[in-house]
Image: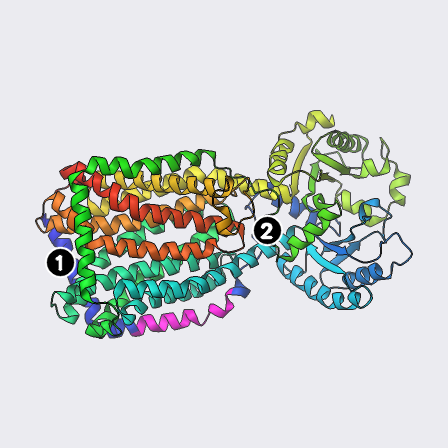
């Protein structure tokens, strides 16, 4: 053993002894901090934002701000109330629509309403129903709060309307309602997933450990890590906006990672106890070896989440913060609190034993037999295990990052029901309207001759576009090639302010897309719009256009993720390389680990393509039909999380192999012994992870379903074929070069 290694070992020994010796003081300090954070957990729903905030600094956000501050339009921000099964508004009985419109107009946060009662426009007429366009006041709080208040109003209103029309339906939809519902539903799915998986995880842990107390410790560690992390998120949210999707990631990762770390620590403790070591010495030994592994693992997992902070999107940064919090909490609980608990429990950890130790011995025999099989034919194992992963990874080339078209949102969401109602009316494209703000050059205004003609030319060009069903602008509405001061003076102030900014430097053109346009098509159309030579089309030098609306929001979100992908991937790979380089003093170990992680990610995404895009086995996950896109954010989230979790199991195995080599074993013997000692821990930890992620994959919300499936597939692939077959085979083939330039 090298002198530096001896020094490091002695330092770790002293640190482990110090922590176990002062376990009571540490428990009191950590307990006080945990209680303070757990006290904040009930505030999570109130503190975390429901609306996403979108891509920071994006063009769609600029348009939204401009409409809210520079225009006087009451519909700068709006929602849509779909109304079904009341008398048609163009008939004699308009009382129901009148009552609805009047009640909504008086609701807090409503700047104005617009319906067939205000403008005799055929757009509002359909045999399937009608709708109410509702302007949201910009100074009445966030969009999420406005949607909550409006739904409370219609909840009371629905009872009154149904007294006359029993089948009447009132459903809020639109960008603000979708944003609120998507995040609220995903949070509910997370809570349901926890309730589904916890009993199953407990049963698995009882089987793995053979006793109730030993099984409860990892579960308690995971639950405590989740609670502490959510309390920490409440504190962070006071200085940095976070979205409610943070709850999903804290629940998924906290339950899996907290159990993983505790499982490793408890396994090492019981292993030492079974050799006849004293209780305190067993706790010190467990912390000495497992603690070092947990710290390296936490660093590797944390790198993946930290990289998401580079993406200028509030949602992904919230996922990053949630992940970092739960990693830190899991690591601290497992290394500072759990060893003291184990020292206090001693042999009582076997209370409630349900399995004899002989079963554990048989497990060791099976793993030793497998280790010798890999040692005998490492090249064959490499080929047999690697071939299916390469085949799965090949399918990842067909991955579509489009937003899925068609009906993929949960039916229980009110905004989904509202969208379906608009679809039956032939007005589904209403919520997908694009808002093109024309920025005129200095010295030109929207009511000057040149400015007017420029806006008119752009409006007419848009009417010729096959993607557009309807165009609305002031020059088109007035039907004149030149501005008329007489006509403009007769125009109601609110109509003028809806299309021209107060300083007349901006003009608005609204584009309603055709009904059949998918979300992906509209995103591509937004990019095409932004590429238009506005000066050439308008005939006025210095003219610029800015595109907003829900499709533009989606386009900006996709662009923010795509523009950050290379930096995120580079940071994760470089950070992982350096962490393993420092942890194991080897060049080949991090290179091999990174290559295998990339293979796991590719195979997992290939499996997602086969299931969700091709439909193979999709029905087992509750999917009625294949989808044509897996969302822009899914690949980068899966990459960052899988890279970290895969490194978790790599570190578990490598640390044990290195430990045996340092004790004097040959490389081949150490690999076999490493499999014997960690094979059960890794596969048990992976089984828990797979159960947790599968619980999320069985939810109703598609993006969480895809994430859950991809993560479950990645962990299953990584903990079996990669870490138990391909990884050991490569370690055996590389021999002493595994640890170059260091020596073991």
Q: Is residue 172 left or right of residue 92?
A: left
Closer to the camera, 534 or 39? 39
The reply to whether the C-beta atoms of the residues labelled 1 and 2 are less than 8 Å apart is no
**Residue found 43% across the figure and 63% down from its top:** 232
Residue 35: x and y, percent? 39, 73
**Residue found 78% across the figure and 68% down from its top:** 160
Tell me the crowding category of disc 2: few under 14, some 14 to 19, or many 20 or more residues within 10 angstroms, Cα based. some
Q: Which mark is residue 101?
A: none
Quarter of the image that includes the C terminus: top left
Closer to the camera, 275 or 430? 275
Q: CA distance from mark 1 to mark 2?
A: 56 Å
**Residue found 78% across the figure and 55% down from its top:** 113
Mark nearer the viewer, 1 or 2: 2
Q: Is residue 294 left or right of residue 417?
A: left
The answer to whether residue 658 is visible is no
Q: Secondary structure at mark 2?
A: loop
Q: Which mark is residue 10?
A: 1
Q: Is residue 41 magenta?
A: yes
- Mark 1 vs 2, N-terminal side: 1
- Using the rendered view, name the quadrant where residue 258 is placed: bottom left
Which residue is disc 2 drawn over?
Answer: 409
**Residue found 79% across the figure and 52% down from its top:** 129
Residue 182: x and y, percent? 57, 54
Q: Which stretch did the figure color magenta?
A: 28-44
Closer to the camera, 51 or 601? 601
């Amino acid at each position: 053993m090298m002198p530096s290694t001896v020094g490091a070992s002695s330092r770790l020994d002293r640190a482990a002894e110090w922590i176990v010796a002062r376990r009571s003081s540490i428990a009191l300090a950590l307990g006080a901090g945990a209680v303070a954070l757990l006290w904040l957990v009930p505030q999570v729903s109130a503190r975390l934002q429901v609306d996403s905030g979108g891509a920071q600094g994006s063009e769609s956000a600029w348009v939204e701000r401009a409409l809210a501050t520079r225009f006087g339009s009451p519909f700068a921000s709006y929602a849509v109330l779909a109304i079904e099964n009341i008398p048609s508004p163009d008939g004699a009985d308009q009382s129901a629509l009148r009552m609805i419109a009047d009640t909504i107009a008086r609701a807090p946060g409503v700047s104005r309403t617009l319906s067939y009662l205000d403008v005799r426009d055929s757009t509002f007429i359909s045999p399937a129903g009608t709708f109410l366009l509702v302007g949201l006041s910009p100074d009445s709080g966030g969009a999420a709060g406005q949607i909550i208040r409006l739904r409370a109003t219609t909840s009371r209103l629905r009872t009154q309307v149904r007294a006359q029309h029993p089948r009447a339906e009132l459903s809020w939809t639109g960008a603000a309602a979708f944003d609120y519902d998507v995040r609220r539903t995903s949070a509910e799915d997370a809570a349901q997933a926890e309730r589904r998986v916890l009993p199953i995880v407990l049963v698995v842990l009882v089987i793995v450990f053979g006793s109730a107390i030993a099984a409860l410790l990892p579960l308690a560690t995971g639950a405590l890590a989740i609670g502490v992390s959510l309390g920490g998120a409440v504190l962070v949210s006071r200085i940095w906006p976070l979205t409610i999707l943070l709850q999903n990631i804290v629940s998924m990762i906290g339950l899996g990672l907290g159990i993983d770390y505790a499982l490793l620590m408890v396994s090492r403790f019981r292993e030492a106890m079974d050799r006849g070591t004293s209780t305190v010495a067993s706790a010190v030994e467990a912390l000495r070896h497992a603690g070092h592994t947990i710290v390296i693992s936490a660093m590797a997992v944390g790198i993946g989440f930290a990289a998401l902070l580079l993406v200028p999107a509030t949602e992904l940064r919230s996922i990053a913060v949630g992940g970092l919090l739960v990693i830190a909490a899991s690591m601290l609980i497992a290394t500072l609190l759990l060893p003291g608990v184990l020292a206090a429990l001693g042999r009582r950890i076997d209370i409630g034993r349900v399995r004899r130790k002989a079963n554990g011995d048989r497990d060791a025999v099976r793993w030793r037999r497998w280790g010798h099989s890999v040692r005998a034919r490492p090249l064959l194992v490499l080929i047999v295990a690697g071939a299916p992963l390469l085949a799965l990874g090949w399918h990842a080339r067909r991955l579509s990052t489009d937003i899925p078209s068609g009906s993929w949102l949960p039916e229980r969401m009110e905004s989904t029901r509202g969208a379906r109602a608009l679809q039956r009316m032939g007005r589904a494209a209403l919520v997908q309207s694009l808002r093109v703000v024309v920025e005129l050059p200095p010295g030109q205004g929207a009511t000057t001759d040149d400015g007017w003609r420029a806006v008119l030319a752009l409006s007419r060009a848009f009417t010729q576009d096959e993607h557009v069903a309807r165009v609305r602008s002031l020059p088109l509405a007035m039907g004149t090639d030149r501005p008329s001061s007489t006509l403009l003076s007769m125009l109601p102030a609110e109509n003028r302010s809806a299309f021209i900014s107060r300083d007349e430097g901006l003009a608005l053109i609204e584009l309603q897309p055709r009904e059949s346009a998918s979300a992906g098509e509209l995103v591509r159309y937004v990019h095409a719009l932004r590429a238009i030579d506005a000066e050439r089309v308008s005939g006025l030098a210095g003219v610029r256009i800015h595109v907003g609306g829900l499709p533009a929001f989606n386009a900006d979100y996709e662009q923010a993720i795509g523009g950050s992908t290379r930096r995120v991937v580079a940071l994760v790979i470089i950070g992982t390389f350096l962490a393993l380089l420092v942890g194991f003093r080897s060049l080949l170990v991090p290179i091999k680990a990174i290559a295998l992680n990339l293979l796991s990610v590719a195979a997992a995404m290939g499996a997602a393509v086969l299931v969700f895009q091709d439909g193979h086995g999709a029905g087992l996950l509750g999917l009625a039909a294949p989808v044509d896109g897996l969302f822009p954010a899914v690949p980068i989230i899966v990459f960052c999380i899988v890279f970290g979790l895969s490194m978790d199991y790599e570190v578990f195995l490598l640390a044990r192999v290195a430990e045996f080599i340092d004790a004097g074993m040959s490389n081949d013997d150490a690999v076999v012994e490493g499999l014997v000692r960690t094979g059960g821990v890794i596969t048990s930890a992976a089984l828990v992870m797979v159960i947790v992620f599968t619980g999320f994959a069985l939810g109703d919300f598609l993006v969480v379903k895809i994430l859950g499936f991809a993560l479950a597939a990645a962990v299953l692939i990584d903990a079996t074929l990669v870490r138990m077959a391909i990884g050991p085979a490569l370690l055996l083939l590389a021999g002493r070069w595994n640890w170059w330039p260091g020596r073991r």
